[in-house]
Amino acid sequence: MRTFDELLIEGVEADVGGWGFGWLDGRATEERPPWGYAGLLAERLGRARSALDLDTGGGEIIAEMPSLPPRMAVTEGWAPNAEQARHRLGPRGVDVAEVAPGAPLPFDDSTFDLVSSRHPVRPDFAEIARVLAPGGTYLGQHVGPASAFELIEWFLGPLPRERLARDPAREAAAARAAGLDVVDLRTARCRMEFFDVGAVVWILRKCVWWVPDFDVDRHREPLRRMDAHLREHGVFVAHSTRTLIEATYRDGHVDACDRGHGAGGGGGPRPAPPGR
């Protein structure tokens, strides 16, 4: 293994733009949730006439989709990611809207019959319900409570109050309060593995909300302890948590076929670079 300082330099100098995690190939893995979010989204996009993806990052998940509806829009709050999304999705006719976190969505009421989001910053169910057409669906894979906290607390110490955030039951209650009918709610705990301290530096630079104000000089002591742990044990294990939520905006009508789709999914866990 390379020296501690060499690994720090690699983690600091590597590009963290967009929302791809390919740089971690061979250096870290994350088990995927069992429901197969990409497959669920592809199936629903294939049936939609208009769709909106929120907090799309660099447009990576939408770019993977084999087909898109006639009207497809995405939002992103960080300018460099929005620019990547325009470059990646523009050739497919996707409208990319740069929207600050917490700002109203720049779309008319009842515009979309599908709204989706993978790992949204903070889902605003009132706005989601507003832009959904009657009978429309929200499909989201959210970060769950205490995700990656073994790693986060290595640097910040115990965070008992923060461990209670992103509670799936509270998110479902917020969706219902906004007028949505929650038809599917599932959670998963997924194993994360980091194999060198450079991978840890890189993920903390990319997921800046994990350890606010992370800096290799300021956090050199816990990084050195992490490096020693990795050299002794070969791996640092953490666990991400994920929530699948599907909800429909009803107009006095419940479609049993759609409700059946909500119980779908499939595809077992497989290693992947850690996500947000």
Image (cartoon, helix red, strand yellow):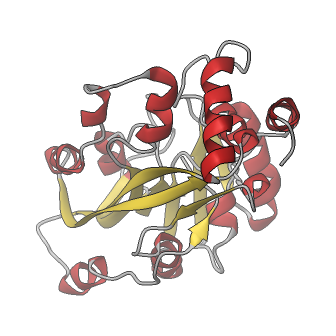
Q: Which residue is located at x 71 percent, y 32 percent?
A: 79
Instruction: Classify residue 171 as left or right of residue 21.
Output: left
Q: Which residue is located at x 49 percent, y 72 percent?
A: 41
Residue 22: image x %, image y %?
76, 58
Instruction: Classify residue 82 as left or right of residue 169.
Output: right
Instruction: Classify residue 228 as left or right of residue 172.
Output: right
Q: Which residue is located at x 46 percent, y 22 percent?
A: 156
Residue 108: image x %, image y %?
44, 45
Which residue is farthest top?
218
Residue 70: image x %, image y %?
60, 72
Instruction: Classify residue 134 as left or right of residue 152.
Output: left
Observer-nearest residue: 99 or 242? 242
Observer-nearest residue: 47 or 150? 150
**69 vs 186: above or below:** below
Observer-nearest residue: 230 or 126? 230
Observer-nearest residue: 182 or 213? 213
Number of callouts in the render? 0
> In the rendered image, is residue 88 in sight?
yes
> In the rendered image, is residue 139 in sight?
no
**216 vs 46: above or below:** above
Residue 109: image x %, image y %?
37, 48
Q: Which residue is located at x 73 percent, y 55 percent?
A: 27
**34 vs 228: above or below:** below
Which residue is farthest left?
252
